Image (tube, rainbow, N blue to C red):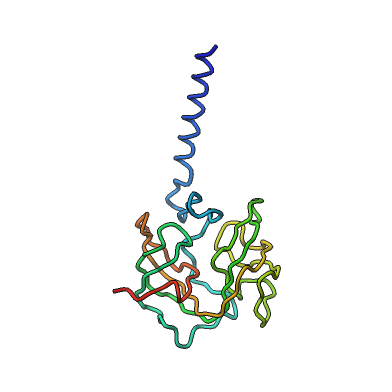
Amino acid sequence: MKNLKMLLGTTSVMAALLLSACTGADDNKAPKENTASHTGHEGMNHSGSGEVPAGLKEAKQPKYPVGSKVVIHADHMPGMDGAKATVTGAFDTIVYTVTYTPTTSGKPVKNHKWVIHEEIENAGDKPFQPGDEVVLNADHMEGMKGAKAVIDSAKQTTVYMVDFIDTETGKKVTNHKWVTEDELSPAK
């Protein structure tokens, strides 16, 4: 009986390891967020369509115009910090960090960077303030669109959409939304 229990326990552990190794192995999907070091960012959509929300205004004099070569200094997801990138869009808006509970699970995502003003339902002309409750129209992550959120911080700035090569996987990420001006530096 003791040997049977050990065999069943070992088999269960091996099956769990095998299943966890296979999770997310579908190469046709965008890479998923590493939850070990970036809690709450699983399901992050690395690449985007390049479409921008209605009403978003292109920056008139961005520090990094479209086509600029830059280095990213942000760790919104694995493989991003230190990546060389090309600017594919520059827009003047208000960026927010938000805490929200995804529509797909009960675990809150805290201080998600970044949601822009134009990605919030019924945004209007006035900026939201920390503590305001909103509904998100952004779909950067699984379960984000339609989620209720609380504004953690707000900042008027230029935001950028970028293409970059993931420093961990070597895969090209296109039209990633969003990085802020202070998260970029000129590529050398």
> Picture quarter containing residue 75?
bottom left
Q: Judge by depth and name the residue closer to the eye, 119 or 75.
A: 75
Q: Check the image and report above or below for 143 versus 11.
A: below
List x then y, in percent, for residue 169: 37, 54
Count of number-bearing discs: 0
Q: Judge by depth and name the residue closer to the eye, 145 or 38.
A: 38
Q: Quadrant of the C terminus?
A: bottom left
Q: Is residue 151 shown left or right of residue 68? A: right
Q: Quadrant of the N terminus?
A: top right
List x then y, in percent, for residue 101: 65, 57
Q: Check the image and report above or below for 75 versus 58.
A: above
> Picture quarter containing residue 89?
bottom left
Q: Check the image and report above or below for 23 versus 147.
A: above
Q: Is residue 81 shown left or right of residue 7? A: left
Q: Is residue 156 shown left or right of residue 164? A: right
Q: Residue furthest left?
A: 188
Q: Check the image and report above or below for 16 versus 153.
A: above
List x then y, in percent, for residue 99: 63, 62
List x then y, in percent, for residue 2: 53, 13
Q: Residue furthest top?
A: 1
Q: Residue furthest bottom?
A: 60
Residue at 47% over, 35% down: 17
Residue at 50% over, 76% down: 159
Residue at 49% over, 65% down: 48
Q: Is residue 185 shown left or right of residue 97? A: left
Q: Judge by depth and name the residue closer to the eye, 102 or 185.
A: 185
